[in-house]
Image: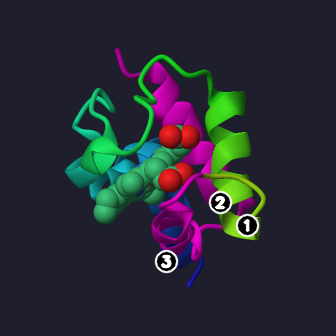
Amino acid sequence: MKKIALALLFAGVSLMANEGEALFKKCASCHGQKAEKSALNKSQVIAGWDAAKIEAALKGYKDGTYGGAMKGLMKGQVASYDDAKIKAVAEYIATLK
Ligand code: HEC
């Protein structure tokens, strides 16, 4: 049992390191692989934003305090993300160049 728990723990750690990247996969279809696109020609280009700014925007979409005409769409994108996931994906986007 202990071995299994340990193996799960390690799997969890490596998952976290790649979590932001994994979480960004579904975003890339609209925002581009490097976040270089204007999503659906509506969003601002988020490549170059720092993590805090992205995090604030995503939290705002989630609670309805941020966004433009298509904010409902983004709300759906992040509705299932908790704060840790929002942070992970924001930090990943901020590393894209
Ligand atoms: C189906 C297309 C689509 C997907 C998938 C998508 N987005 Fe968006 N995103 C948009 C659109 C459209 C907007 C502009 C919404 C508005 O009107 O505020 C936007 C806006 C944003 C903004 C703010 C930019 C601005 O214009 O203020 C951020 C940050 C963002 N998205 C991040 C993400 C992340 C992270 C994911 C993945 C979890 C994601 N998006 C998935 C279409 C998408």
**Prevailing secondary structure class for the magenta stretch in the rendered image:** helix
Element assignment for label 2: helix
Residue 14 in view of the camera = no
Image location (x, y in percent) of residue 4 = 49, 77
Image location (x, y in percent) of residue 2 = 59, 76
- Residue drawn at the location 72% of the way across and 30% of the way down: 52
Left or right of 43, for residue 86: right
Q: Going from the N terminus, do you reach mark 3 or mark 1 first?
A: 3
Ligand 1 within 8 Å of disc 2? The answer is: yes
Amino acid at the residue labelled 2: Tyr
Q: CA distance from mark 3 to mark 1?
A: 41 Å
User: How many marks are shown on the rendered structure?
Assistant: 3
Amino acid at the residue labelled 1: Gly
Q: CA distance from mark 1 to mark 2?
A: 5 Å
Q: Nearer the viewer, residue 20 or 65?
A: 65
Image location (x, y in percent) of residue 49 = 55, 22
Left or right of 51, for residue 69: left
Quadrant assignment for the N terminus = bottom right
Mark 2: few, some, or many residues within 10 Å (few <14, many ≥20)? many
Question: Looking at the rendered structure, which numbered label has been put on residue 4?
Answer: 3
| Nearest to viewer (mark 3 / mark 1) | 1
Q: Is residue 94 above or below residue 22?
A: above
Q: CA distance from mark 2 to mark 3?
A: 39 Å
| Nearest to viewer (mark 2 / mark 3) | 2
Question: Which residues make up the magenta segment?
Answer: 68-97
What residue did someone put label 2 on?
61
Quadrant assignment for the C terminus = top left
Left or right of 16, for residue 39: left
